[in-house]
Image: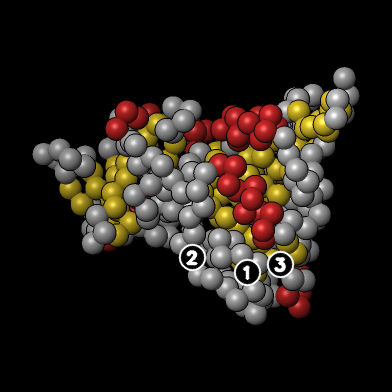
Amino acid sequence: MIIAKNTLFYCRSKRSNVGAFIGSLLLLRKISMASILDDGSCGRGPPLGKVIRGINLNEKVSDETIKQIKKDVHVHRLLIFKDQGQVSGQRHVEISKWFGELESTFYKHPRSPHDDVFRVSNDEDEGCRNVGRTGWHIDGSFMRAPFAFALYHMYSVPKTGDTAYVPLKELIESLSPETRARWEKLWMVSDRRANVIHPVIYPHPVTGEPTICFHLGMTEGFVWNYGTKEQRFTELPETTQILKEIYKEIVKDNRRLVYSHKWEVGDFIISDNLSVGHEATPETQMPRSEVGLRILHRTTIKGTNYPSKDPKSCN
């Protein structure tokens, strides 16, 4: 057995006539959720995600390893593959198809390497700008079935510009009993005209763990007690107050719940979109002349479940 400090390996194993990757967990690394604050201190919180070494996503990956990865992403919510070099748009799409059908809803930037790859940058000539800065969210909250997974690759790494993540199960568990009871009665409305209404808190369709459907920058309003005689839509002042409340719960205790990922060359992240909220930090918008070129490639996997209080009725 290989012993390596703080690392999760998928190891290469030689078989007769075949070199295969076997999903073998040798040692796990729990990423301690830490965000570097303005004063230079670190906020700390519960574990989120795993760093993975020992596998090259640019090469053929065995069916066994793919099966293990698909299992692990639900367990750990973020899988951070290190040392991948540059992953082409075509290969990014091939990896994404391990998880289901791709679904892309955003602009097609002329420099995108593939129709299903959303290209983000701090240079408008290279990619779409100001993405992810409208507030904490999951991707696709405005859709009847939000995206199931999101896959990210920092194709060009700037000096600074983190992506911040928050584990939604732990966020719910950190709420006071009174606050959780209130949120359990809330449904979010992305666009009342489209009639897309989701419960704020609901069980994850795969793990059954409590999670949240939300977008702090793309929410038209909320509904209290949706589908009952006590149903009531919020007006703008109350909607704003609820959005602020959610934000404060995410960043409370010096961002204790937040893991801020500092991108390195070769990073490739697979996330369970339904269990992790995220946002781009302000530094992601810093100009190329100051921090260098930032190019992020992202794909999203079509959701197959509607958020529902009743997990049996979410398909």
Quick one: label 1 or label 2, which is nearer the N terminus?
2
- Spatial CA distance of label 1 from label 2 is 12 Å
Q: Which quarter of the image is occupied by the C terminus?
A: top left
* Quarter of the figure with residue 283: bottom right
- Return the x and y of residue 174 as percentages of the image width and height: 49, 32
Q: Which quarter of the image is occupied by the N terminus?
A: top right
Quick check: can you spot residue 10? Answer: yes
Identity of the residue furthest to the top in this view: 1
How packed is label 3: few (under 14 Cα within 10 Å), some, or many (20 or more)? many
Residue wearing tag 1: 112
Compare residues 275 and 282 and report the one nearer the observer. Answer: 275
- Return the x and y of residue 258 as percentages of the image width and height: 60, 44
Where is 238 relative to 272, above or below? Answer: below
Quick one: label 2 or label 3, which is nearer the N terminus?
2
Q: Amino acid at mark 3?
A: Arg
Q: Amino acid at mark 2?
A: Phe
Find out whether the residues at labels 2 and 3 contact each other: C-beta distance under 8 Å.
Answer: no
Compare residues 47 and 147 and report the one nearer the observer. Answer: 147
- Name the secondary structure under disc 3: loop
Write the residue at 52% across / 33% down. 170
How packed is label 2: few (under 14 Cα within 10 Å), some, or many (20 or more)? few
- Name the secondary structure under disc 1: loop
Residue wearing tag 3: 294
Residue wearing tag 2: 106
93 sits left or right of 58 in the view: left
How packed is label 1: few (under 14 Cα within 10 Å), some, or many (20 or more)? some
Identity of the residue furthest to the front in this view: 17
Write the residue at 71% across / 67% down. 294
Display colour scheme: secondary structure
Quick check: can you spot residue 7? Answer: no
